[in-house]
Amino acid sequence: GDSVTQMEGPVTLSEEAFLTINCTYTATGYPSLFWYVQYPGEGLQLLLKATKADDKGSNKGFEATYRKETTSFHLEKGSVQVSDSAVYFCALSSLGAGNMLTFGGGTRLMVKP
Amino acid sequence: DAGITQSPRHKVTETGTPVTLRCHQTENHRYMYWYRQDPGHGLRLIHYSYGVKDTDKGEVSDGYSVSRSKTEDFLLTLESATSSQTSVYFCAISESAPLNEQFFGPGTRLTVL
């Protein structure tokens, strides 16, 4: 079945540092890929998405490129802020019953001033 | 923000009691989902619905039932709550088109003593 693997956290960075959170996937067919973010005490919010190979999703300074050859969708940001501290989830959606999402385990990011 | 509400937001109950969680949407989206979030497991799908009275099981459906009598409401019932069902429960919605992103509610924190 489908699966998503994320790097384990927590990831601790200083403000203005470069961020990479690795995500790889296993899926049949051609899934859509997503990054969701969860701030403390809140539900998940869609951060960005990509629907086909070589697509780049971007939002709020974050970006991720759909790499079919390496089955990866790594999240990057050039300069993190304290307000980026949150848990980040990589997910995929494959064609099939229910339009279901398969999530990775989540990566907690802590940004220090 | 997508119009999704969950009730109650917090609940403490005792082992063996029935519990019903409600998800309400104002977006008229076809698909609705119930997930649970536990440390180290990310989000896991419990049940989902692809239309009124149309539901199916997810990855961790044992001990849970659902009902959808109206487009806007999706109920999750724990017939006899157990301590292993202590978790944070999230509802999500999605439009009809395949591979669309899901929008999440704020979550319900359930504690079973």
Image (spheres, helix red, strand yellow):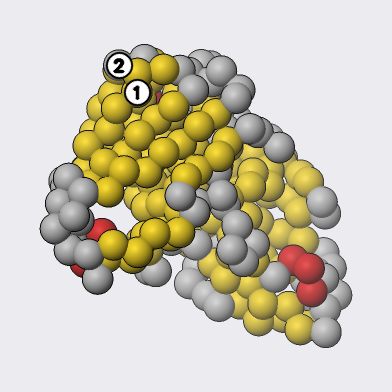
Q: Quadrant of the N terminus of chain B?
A: top right
| Residue type marked 1 | Arg
Under circle 2, the secondary element is loop
Look at 39% across and 69% down and name the residue there. Answer: B39
Left or right of A23? Residue B110 is left
Are labels 1 and 2 assigned to the same chain? Answer: yes
| Chain letter for the residue marked with disc 2 in the picture | B
Graded by Cα atoms within 10 Å as few (under 14), some (14 to 19) or many (20 or more), the crowding at tag 2 reads: few
Is B9 situated above or below A92?
below
Q: Nearer the viewer, residue B8 or B25?
A: B8
Is A32 situated above or below B31?
below
Query: Which image quadrant for residue B33?
Result: top left
The earlier-in-sequence mark between 1 and 2 is 2
- Is residue B94 visible in the rendered image? The answer is yes
Look at 78% across and 68% down and name the residue there. Answer: A83
Q: Which residue is mark 2?
A: B53
| Residue type marked 2 | Lys
Count the labels in the image: 2
Residue A64 percent coordinates (x, y) = 68, 49
Left or right of A7? Residue A88 is right
Look at 82% across and 71% down and name the residue there. Answer: A81
Tell me, for residue B8, which label it has, or none: none
Labels 1 & 2 near each other (Cβ < 8 A):
yes
Tell me, for residue B68, which label it has, or none: 1
Residue A100 percent coordinates (x, y) = 40, 33
